[in-house]
Image: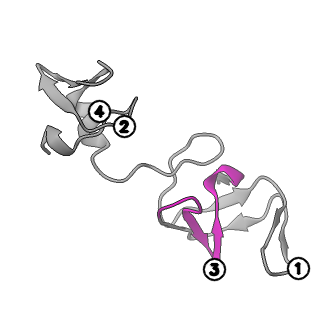
Amino acid sequence: MSTDDLACPQCSLTETHLLGSNHVCDTCGHEWPAEVAEERSGEEAVRDANGVILASGDTVTVIKDLKVKGSLTVLKVGTKLKNIRIGSGDHAVDAGGFMLKAEFLRKS
């Protein structure tokens, strides 16, 4: 991966360069190890309410009653949702046709 398209984790600007074994942001001066940058080269990880990384196929538990828009349905606290799919955006978790925010879920 070239440093031309690598964004700084602190200010998110792409004006960075490699200095030894660290990447350095030209704008804010933030430095971070090159191996951390390689791990982040893919999409940002989707994390549950406890900060655990979620992956497609995981089982999660709802931690708050969630009203479903356009319906009278409510997902109650403690509801287990199996075989989730991870997407992108604000509602990154697809669980049984429901698009949910990861902050209201806990990995089971």
- Residue corresponding to mark 4: 36
For the N terminus, the quadrant is top left
- Residue corresponding to mark 3: 97
Q: Given contact means CB atoms under 8 Å apart, are the residues at marks 4 and 2 in contact?
A: no
Q: State the image quarter where residue 25 is shown.
A: top left
Query: Where 89 sits versus 98, above or below?
Result: above
Q: CA distance from mark 1 to mark 4?
A: 44 Å
First in sequence: mark 1 or mark 4? 4
- Residue corresponding to mark 2: 12
Q: Given contact means CB atoms under 8 Å apart, are the residues at marks 3 and 1 in contact?
A: no
- Residue corresponding to mark 1: 72
Q: Judge the density around disc 2: few (<14), some (14-19), many (≥20) Cα neighbours within 10 Å.
A: few
At mark 4, the secondary structure is helix
At mark 1, the secondary structure is loop
Q: CA distance from mark 4 to mark 3?
A: 34 Å
Residue displayed at 26% across by 36% down: 37
Q: CA distance from mark 4 to mark 2?
A: 15 Å
Could you say which is closer to the camera, residue 89 or residue 33? Answer: 89
Query: Where 89 sits versus 12, above or below?
Result: below
Give the magenta-colored segment's residue range.
88-104
Single out the mark in the foreground, 3 or 1: 1
Picture coordinates of residue 5, whole percent (x, y)? 20, 45
